[in-house]
Image (cartoon, rainbow, N blue to C red):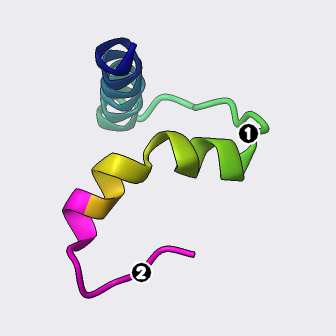
Amino acid sequence: MEVQKAAKRSSELTRQLLAFARKQTVSPKVIHLKNTVEGMLKMLQRLIGEDIELI
């Protein structure tokens, strides 16, 4: 399940990077920020280190 989530996030990031590189217009969409951050919490904690606390 976690691998699938990570693959989906990386796929979305790749799509965004390719769109940016091609100067394509990206259509904005509404997201639930809390759910998005919670889904990325483990990765964020590894990236920001121990000296920063996410609340």
Q: Quadrant of residue 50?
A: bottom left
Residue ID at (79%, 38%): 30
Q: Quadrant of residue 52?
A: bottom left
Residue ID at (22%, 62%): 47
**Residue that carries the numbered disc 1 in the rendered image:** 31
The local crowd at label 2, few if under 14, some if 14 to 19, many if 20 or more residues have their Cα within 10 Å, is few
Under mark 2, the amino acid is Glu
Q: Pinpoint residue 19: horizontal percent, then vertical percent.
A: 40, 28
Query: On the picture, is 32 further left or further right than 13?
Result: right
Under mark 1, the amino acid is Ile
| C-alpha span from label 1 to label 2 | 23 Å
Q: Secondary structure at mark 1?
A: loop
Residue 22 part of the magenta segment: no
Q: Quadrant of residue 29?
A: top right
Q: Is residue 22 above or below residue 45?
A: above
The local crowd at label 1, few if under 14, some if 14 to 19, many if 20 or more residues have their Cα within 10 Å, is few
Query: On the picture, is 38 further left or further right than 22?
Result: right
Name which of mark 1 and mark 2 comes first in the sequence. Answer: 1
Q: Is residue 10 above or below residue 7?
A: below
Residue ID at (39%, 13%): 1
Q: Pinpoint residue 3: horizontal percent, then vertical percent.
A: 29, 16
Residue segment shown in magenta: 46-55
Q: Is residue 14 above or below residue 7?
A: below
**Residue that carries the numbered disc 2 in the rendered image:** 53
Query: For the C terminus, which image quadrant?
Result: bottom right
Most common SS among magenta residues: loop
Q: Which label number is shown at residue 51?
A: none
Q: Pinpoint residue 36: horizontal percent, then vertical percent.
A: 59, 43
Query: On the picture, is 54 further left or further right than 33?
Result: left
